[in-house]
Amino acid sequence: MSTMSTYPPRPQLDRKSAKNLRIQIRKVISLFRTKSQRRLSSPKVWLGDEKLPTVVEITCSTPDIPTSQTALVVARKGEYELRSNHDMPKLESDDEVIIRTHAVGLNPIDWKSVSYNFCLPSFPHITGREMAGVVERVGTNVTHLQPGDPVWTSTYYRDPRAGCFQEYVTVPQHTVHPIPRGLSFEEASCLGVGALTAAMTLWKWLDVPVSDAAASEVRGEGEGEWIFIWGGSTVTGQFATQIAKLGGLRVITVCSGRTAELSRALGADHVVVRDGRAEADILAEVERVTAGGVTRMLDLVGPKTAAACVRLCMSESQKGRRVVFAPLAMIGKEEVLEWVEVVTVEMKRFVLNVECGEYGRRLNDLFEASELKLPELEVLRGGLSVVEQGLEMLKLGNMGGKKLVVAM
Ligand SMILES: NC(=O)c1ccc[n+]([C@@H]2O[C@H](COP(=O)([O-])OP(=O)(O)OC[C@H]3O[C@@H](n4cnc5c(N)ncnc54)[C@H](OP(=O)(O)O)[C@@H]3O)[C@@H](O)[C@H]2O)c1
């Protein structure tokens, strides 16, 4: 009778070591798979010619993560410091996840909060609101993720453990989503602010239908309803335009001449080119095209353009028509019109309300179904040491529709 034998003989492991070994193997395979899948178009050949580490090359010890890491810290008012010995952000609850950063998205709020000293609860603090990376460790209640998974997240400024300008971030599990198929870390690193803000603003606050079936009500029999977006070429505006179209709305945007074509290509039905024009002239064109059909408005530029949006609602054709307005880049003390509802978009809801994780899942579904296009990326290489340089570029405000991300 033959006996089953293994060669080489299996090492005898206790239960804890065996569990650790399994975690390490999953992590290596998952990392390897992600990297290779991204490079090769055919999933059949993803093993390619890369050398898969053998089991003996993987240690059986607890998957240690370092006790310190590199972080770009706001050390004091208006001043960054790149620190190589900053504490690791630890798990403080069983529902949290530690992610190793592979790419971070840069946003206007990152430089504004440091230049104008707001959203900085104490010093030292770490800013940065969106990132993509690989799960490093999970709390015991986390079942939908495991070490090695490629993920993206969107974070809340109050918790320095979640600031994205560091090598590791620690965040609640419901804010962590798998990277949609076919997206790189750099591409996924811009989902957490522009894409998520557009999605939540439209779906949650502006009541834009998510599904095609519901969209037909908005489309209506005749001309349908319009959304007016001031700042159609901003990264947030690009996502908002596409999500509004998917929800059945007609879209009118304001852009400069150099980005007008981009806005049209993303689905805007009409683009008002703003170059050298007075506000009254721009509004007259919006009124002529939409003929009193605006039901939703989004401002992505600032208090002056937000005030102009409100003035549109005083025009002959819009007067009395109910409009919901989301001024995402601040609003001054405007005259309150009883037919205009100004909503306060609170993106912190995504982090504070577990059920808002659903918006991340819906967004992923749209990417998986190739329904959304990403903005053109400008990738800065050099990790945390080039973040400040990137924020200076953003400050100039002439990205022309491009999204700036930093690869670690
Ligand atoms: N509340 C929130 O949670 C939240 C979340 C996301 C964004 N925001 C805010 O929304 C705004 C947009 O953010 P973003 O990252 O999407 O912006 P962004 O991509 O950095 O926007 C840059 C673009 O703005 C356009 N622009 C500048 N002045 C304009 C004007 N007068 N009219 C029309 N477009 C103009 C320029 O394009 P053109 O050449 O086409 O003019 C420029 O390329 C920021 O103020 C940001 O702080 C808020």
Image: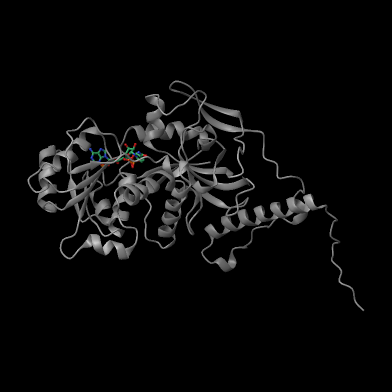
Q: Position of residue 394 (x, y in %)?
A: 36, 35
What residue is drawn where x is 32% and y is 47%?
A: 205
In terms of depth relative to the viewer, which is nearer, 92 or 22?
A: 92
Q: Is residue 124 left or right of residue 108?
A: right
Image quadrant of ligand 1?
Answer: top left
What residue is drawn where x is 83% and y is 53%?
A: 13
Q: Is residue 384 left or right of residue 229?
A: right
> Is 217 located above or below residue 176 in the figure?
below
What residue is drawn where x is 28% and y is 61%?
A: 215
Q: Is residue 88 left or right of residue 62?
A: left
> Is 277 located above or below residue 241 in the figure?
above
**Image quadrant where one finds the N terminus:** bottom right
In terms of depth relative to the viewer, which is nearer, 248 or 141?
A: 141
- Residue lying furthest bottom in this view? 1
What residue is drawn where x is 31% and y is 35%?
A: 397
How is the rendered protein coloured?
one colour
Q: Position of residue 373 (x, y in %)?
A: 37, 55
In terms of depth relative to the viewer, which is nearer, 313 or 50?
A: 313
Q: Position of residue 404 (x, y in %)?
A: 40, 42
Q: Position of residue 196 (x, y in %)?
A: 40, 47
- Residue lying furthest left in this view? 316
**Can the viewer see residue 230 in this picture?**
no
- Residue lying furthest right in this view? 1
Where residue 372 sits, quadrant-wise, is bottom left
Q: Is residue 190 left or right of residue 67?
A: left
